[in-house]
Image (spheres, rainbow, N blue to C red):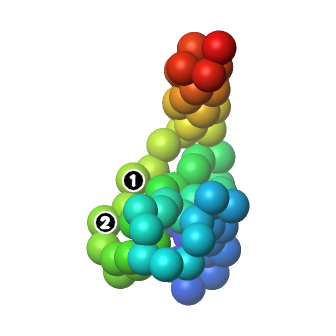
Amino acid sequence: MTPPSSIQWRRSSYSNGMGGECLEVATVTAAVTVRDSKVASGPQLTLSATTWQNFIQALTVRVGDVTS
């Protein structure tokens, strides 16, 4: 397991820094970890790289459906 202090979190480019809803994502050994940026010490969700990729693909398809 990767020590929490060595994880490099990335925040969504859509985050405006004004306290809005935002996720942070970190890549750890063969997985992706997600947390709420407002509660950095709170729970984290860890997904396999394949599951994360499928999730992102599903979001992309849904956004394409809405904007078409």
Above or below 27: residue 48: above
Residue 61 visible? The answer is no
| Residue 31 on image: x %, y % | 58, 47
**Disc 1 secondary structure class:** strand
Three-letter residue code for mark 1: Leu
Q: Which mark is residue 56?
A: none
Question: Which residue: 41% across, 62% down?
Answer: 21
Q: Which residue carries the number 2 mark? A: 43
Residue for point 43% across, 68% down: 20
Contact, mark 2 vs mark 1 (Cβ under 8 Å): yes
Residue 14 image position (x, y, % from top left): 63, 58
Q: Residue furthest front?
A: 68
Q: Nearer the viewer, residue 14 or 28?
A: 14
Q: Which residue is mark 1?
A: 45
What is the spatial separation of the Cα atoms under label 2 and label 1, in whole angstroms?
Answer: 7 Å
Q: Quadrant of the C terminus?
A: top right
Q: Which residue is nearer to you in this view: 65 or 7?
A: 65
Q: In the rendered picture of this protein, how many numbered marks are placed on residues?
A: 2
The kind of secondary structure element at disc 2 is loop
Q: Residues within 10 Å of mark 1 (few under 14, many from 20)?
A: few
Q: Position of residue 46 (x, y in %)?
A: 45, 51
Q: Residue at x 57, y 14 (%)?
A: 65
Q: Amino acid at mark 2?
A: Pro
Viewer-side residue, 65 vs 33: 65
